Image (cartoon, grey):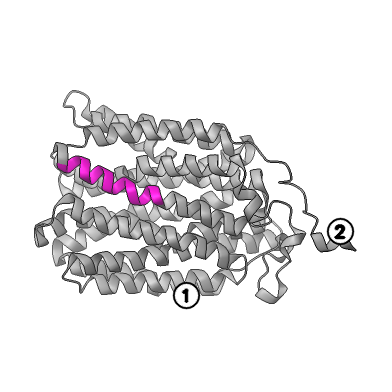
Amino acid sequence: MSDRQRQGWLVITAFVVSEITVYGTSMGTTGVFITPLIRYFHWNHEQVSRIASAWALLYGLGCPVAGWLVDRINARWIVASGCALAGLGYLMASQIGTLEGLVACYALVGFGTALSADTVLMAVAVSWFGERSALAIGIGAAGRSIGLATGPSWVTWVVMHYGWRVGMAAIALPMLGLGLPVSLLLIRKSASQGYAAEPQAQAAPAQLPGLEVLPALGTIAFWLIVSSNLIYSSGTTGTVLHLIPYLISIAFTPAAAAAIFGVQATFAGIGHLVLGWLADRYGAKPTAVAAFAMAAVATMLLLGVANPRMGAFALVLFIPLWGFSFGGDTLMSVVLVQSLGRRRYGTLAGILNAFNSIGHMGGPLLIGMMYDLSGNYRSAFLTGAGLASVAAIAGSLVFPVKGHDQVQVEASALAV
């Protein structure tokens, strides 16, 4: 392994830490607080689901900001700021006594997560590893799955013994004590790929192949990528958020539900690595499409867990299948650079993740409202399976556009 490769993987390691402490933990533990908050404040499922929607909304608004920033300044400052904001949000949430205040705190956490997670990870990974960056992105994103796997269990234990307020304060500690300093120490950008270690050394965008932002936004390929991720996240994010409450509703204990959530998240971490390895060898698009299809099948199996005759069998099948499918949307970021080029990849990835967050915002609300109307999760999970299937179809229609692998000629250059 060359010095450059070692430095690149060291940078990815820093993203693993930030994804564990910020993205994975904040996303994975929201469901832990649903039942305690309902009992403490006497809110309904739709009201409590607003905190997840606020997180997703500000995450979505923050992604274009993160993408714009990563095309211009050192990524370490962006990620460190995100860790600090997310930690501050949880510290404030631990002292809040109103729904509006809690929603505002989760909005701050969502914005911090946008700065510290996927958009910046994608841009920096592409800068170090080029178009064969699926494995690097997968390893970085696996940190999210580790947070999803470990966060619910230990936060559930804290909440059960000390209450939900202490649980929220505890979440802030690794964000501020680990994610923040590690990102400041380790994150760098690659000058040879157009992302320099320092802003003044950054290569000009004109030196990179691909489309500018406005031409890229005018392509069918970009909107197919956006549509596949948006539809996929709409169908699956609500399932992730409501998995623990669903299992509790069919007679699992809170501890058992959190443990099951953790096991499937562990498989998701492994899945990120496997999908990344497969994508770098057999193509990001077919791998992502297969992952979307697996998510549809897994969601159907989740409904079978409530059936006494097939519950255990359905659960054993659901856990690995769902976990391995959970990185499909991340792979579409590689499809993005392969289809549109690296010229304005950070900005385009930020826009992609912003649309993706619309699904993150709408999915939890949809499932919460459908549960309140029907008293069960059947219709919501059936809808989720259908959306994942549509996402697979949309992703399969994406192809590289003309000029994605060419350096664009500037008008000033033509005039010389």
Query: What kind of residue is marked 1?
Result: Pro
Q: Residue furthest top?
A: 309
Q: Where is 330 relative to 384, above or below? A: below
Residue at 54% over, 43% down: 223
Residue at 25% over, 43% down: 367
Left of 102 or right of it: where is 110? Answer: right
> x, y (%) of residue 236?
36, 41
Query: What kind of residue is marked 2?
Result: Leu
Residue at 43% over, 39% down: 324
Q: Identify the main secondary structure in magenta.
A: helix
- The residue pinned by badge 1 equals 181
Query: Of discs 2 and 1, which sits in the foreground?
Result: 2
Number of disc labels: 2
- The residue pinned by badge 2 equals 414
Secondary structure type for disc 1:
helix
Q: Do the residues labelled 2 and 1 touch (CB within 8 Å)?
A: no
